[in-house]
Image (cartoon, rainbow, N blue to C red):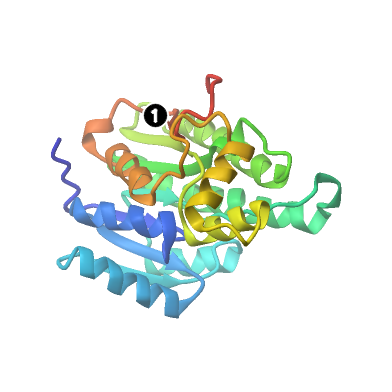
Amino acid sequence: MRIDLAGRTAVVTGSSQGIGLAIATGLAGAGARVVLTGRSRERLDTAAGALRGTEPGAELLTVACDLATEQGAAELLEAVPAADILVNNLGIFGSRPPLEITDDEWRTYFDTNVLSAVRLIRRYLPGMTGRGWGRVQNIASDSAVVIPAEMIHYGMSKTALLAVSRGFAKEAAGTGVTVNSVIAGPTHTGGVEDFVHELVGEDLPWDEAQRAFMREYRPQSLLQRLIEPEEIANLVVYLSSPQASATTGAAVRVDGGYIDSIVP
C-alpha cells in the first residue's frame, strides 16, 4: 500500500518523544508537512533533528506550548491556523492508589488527556469540514475499557477520549472528514520503562522487568511484550490516509490482544 500525504499538514501533539515522535516520523515519511508540539523547546529541537535524520527531506515546524492550557492552544493555533490531520497524542500517566487520588490530580488528568484534544478538534474541525477532507485521531489506551486498579484516573481520561471521538465523528458525518480513536496497549517508551520498574522493582534487567510486568499487570496480552511506538505509528499513518476514508467513529485497536471486549 502506497500512502501519499504530500500537501497535507499534520499536527501531532506531545511529539517531542516516544509515540508522538514515532507518529510524526511516519507521517513525514508519507510526505506530510508535520508540526511537532511540546512544552520544551530543547526537546523539540532534539526531536526535529532525530526526525530529519530519519526523513532528510521532511518539512517540519516546531511549536513550544503547553496544550493542557487555553493559552497553549491559542499559541499553537496562531502558529498553525489550519491542519488537514490532527493527532491528539498528548497525555500523562502514572500509578496511584485509587483512594489517594486528589481532586487536583483528577482535574490535571482530564485537562491534559481530554480537554487538550477537545480544544484543538473544536478549532481545526470546521476548516477540515469546509475543505471536505480531514483526519482526526485521538490516541487512547486499552486502559479506557479495562481500567487498571493502579491508575483509574488515567483510565477515566482515556475512556472519555473514546466518547469524544465518537461524538465528533457524528458532527463530521458526511463531510469527508473522519474522526477515530486508536486504542494503544502498553508501549515501549522511556516513560513506560520507568513506570514498569516502579511496579516490578528496579533490580530486574529490562527484558525480565518487561516480562514480569506483562505477566502480572497485563496477563491478557497475546503479544506478551510491549508494543513499539513505530507499530502504533503505522496504524496512525494508515488512518490518516485517503485509503482509510470509510473508517470513522471507530476505536481501532493496536493493543496486543489485551482487550477481549468489543468497543462500540
Q: Residue drawn at (29%, 44%), measured in percent from left and top? A: 237
Is residue 223 visible in the rendered image? The answer is yes
Is residue 82 visible in the rendered image? The answer is no
Relative placement, left or right, of 59 versus 123 is left
Q: Residue drawn at (50%, 39%), measured in percent from left and top? A: 185
- Using the image, determine if residue 44 lies above or below residue 134: below
Farthest residue to the right: give it.
Answer: 99
Quadrant location, the N terminus: top left
Please state which of residues 9 and 160 is positioned toward the viewer in this rendering: 160
Q: In which quarter of the image is residue 61?
A: bottom left
Relative placement, left or right, of 86 versus 74 is left
Q: Residue drawn at (44%, 28%), measured in percent from left and top? A: 250
Farthest residue to the bottom: give it.
Answer: 42
From the top left corner, tell me how far across and down residue 78 is, in percent.
Answer: 43, 68
Q: What residue type is labelled 1?
A: Thr
From the top left corner, tell me how far across and down residue 183 is, in percent.
Answer: 48, 36
From the top left corner, tell me how far across and down residue 28 is, in percent.
Answer: 24, 57
Element at label 1: loop
Q: Mark 1 points at which residue?
A: 248
| Pointer 1 local density, CA inside 10 Å: few below 14, some 14–19, many at least 20 | many
Please state which of residues 2 and 246 is positioned toward the viewer in this rendering: 2
